[in-house]
Amino acid sequence: MGYKEEYEQKLVSADEAAKIVKSGDWVDYGWCAATPEAIDKALAKRTDELSDVKVRGGILFHLPAIFEREDAGEHFCWNSWHMSGVERRMISMGVGYYSPLKYSELPKYYRQYIETPDVAFFQVAPMDAHGYFNFGPSASHMMAVCETAKKVVVEVNQNMPRCLGGFEADIHISKVDMIVEGENPPICELPAGGEPTEVDRKVAELVVPEIPNGACLQLGIGGMPNTIGKMIAESDLKDLGVHTEMYVDAFVDIAKAGKITGARKSIDRFRQAFAFGAGTKKLYDYVNDNPAVMSAPVDYTNDARTIGAIDNFVSINNAVDVDLYGQVNAESAGVKQISGAGGQMDFVLGAFLSNGGKSFICLSSTFKSKDGVVHSRIRPTLAEGSTVTDTRPQTMYLVTEYGMVCLKGLSAWQRAEAIISIAHPDFRDDLIKEAEKMGMWRRSNK
C-alpha cells in the first residue's frame, strides 16, 4: 500500500479524533506553534462528557477552546512546560499549573519518568513524498511524545513551515494513528515587540562589544535580547553562528544582514540550530524549507556538552531579579509563576564550558509596580517563594544599564560589591546596609 492510500485510510474528521479521549486521560497538545486548533475545538464540544482530562503543552498563543467555558476546570487541567501570558491567566483562573523542568531533560521525562500520554494531538506540515509529516518549528521534544503516546493524531496545516532538521524533526505516517486535515489557520504569531527602550539600548551597548567575530549566538526572548539582536545586525560583526533553544525574529534580521554564515562553528557548520521557533510571519517564511536552519530536539540543542563544544559561545538571556549572592530568578515573582526555567540554566552552563564562551544575564536595574512605586531588581535576597533559575556559582556576567560585572570566582563580599555597583544609584546605599547585616560587606569595600 502506498503512502497516499495509507493517508486516506487514516484520515478522519476532527470530531472523530476527539472521540478517542476518555475521562482521566493524559492528553498531549504538542508545543507552541504545533498546538492543535481544529481538534481542540472538537474536544471542547465533548466537555460535558469528560472529567479529569489532564492536558500537557506549553507557550500557548491563545486560550484553548477546551478552557473557554467557566466550568472548564471541572473537566480539564492544563499542565504547562513553559508559560506564556495566556498560561499565566489560566493559572489565575484555577485551570492550569506550571511543570518545573530543565528543558534539555524534557524528552527523557517522556521516555522514562512521567505518565505516558494516552493521546497526542498536534499540528504538522503536509506529508511529503516519502510519507513524513514535519513538526514545523517545534521539534523540541515531539519525537519523545510520539514514541511514548498510545495514540498519535496529527492535524495537518498547509501553512505550517517545513523545517529541515538533522534528526527527530519529522514523524512517518506508519507511526501515526489518525490524520486530521485542519482548517489551515495562519501559524500563530508572537509579536516582535515595540521599539527598544533607553535601558534596552544601554544594555545592548555593553554586551555587543563583548561578542567576537565568529561567535555562536543564543538569544532569549524579550526586549533586551531583541535589541541586542538588532544592534548585532547593524554591527561590523561577521561569520556568526547560531545554536539556540528558541529561534526568534532577531536571528532573521541578523542573517539577512549577512552576519550569519556558521563557517566557524565546530559542529553543524553553516547551519542555525534551534529547538523551536516562534515569531512573526517573517520568521515562519524564513525557516520554511531553508537549508541554512536546522530544527533539532531539545536534548541536543540544550545539552551543555553540545553547547560547550562550540567555541566562543555567547548566551544572552533575561531575568526578573537577582540578589547579592548572584542568584538569578528568571521565572517568578515570589510564588507567582511568570514564565518558566526553559533552557537558561543549560546555556549558562554550556557557555562556561565553551572555549571563549560567555553568558550574559541582562535586566533593567528597576521596575515600576502597578501603584507607580519604583523597585530595584537587585535585591538583598530573592523574595520569599521566588525561584532560583541560575544558582550563584553558575552566574557569569550580570548586566544592567549601569554596567556589567563577571561573578565567576568572586567571594561573597566581592559579589555584593560588584552587584551593587550595577544597581540603580538610588538603591545602592540601602543595598550596602543590607549587605552589612548579611555579613557580606567588608570595611575595605568601596
Image (cartoon, rainbow, N blue to C red):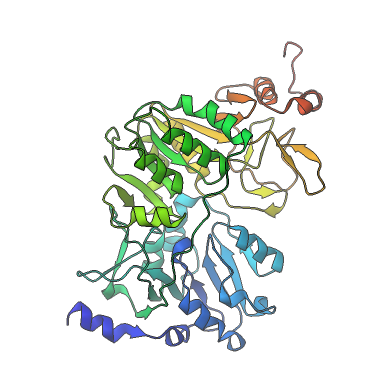
Instruction: Measuring from the top left, give residue 362's x and y in whole percent.
Output: 58, 35
State the residue at coordinates (47%, 33%): 231
Question: Residue 211, how many percent across, how many down?
Answer: 43, 28
As drawn, is 383 to the left or to the right of 141? right
Image quadrant for the N terminus? Answer: bottom left
Q: Residue furthest top?
A: 444
Residue 17 sits in quarter = bottom left
Q: Residue at x 43, y 54 (%)?
A: 277
Q: Position of residue 122 (x, y in %)?
A: 43, 70
Q: Is residue 290 left or right of residue 339?
A: left
Looking at the image, which is closer to me, 25 or 272?
272
On the question of residue 306 being in view, the answer is no
Q: Vertically, is 28 above or below 196?
A: below
Image quarter (top left, top right, bottom left or bottom right) of the C terminus: top right
From the viewer's perspective, tell me whether residue 427 is left or right of residue 165. right
Nearer to us in this view, 78 or 441: 78
Residue 214 placed where, x, y %?
34, 30
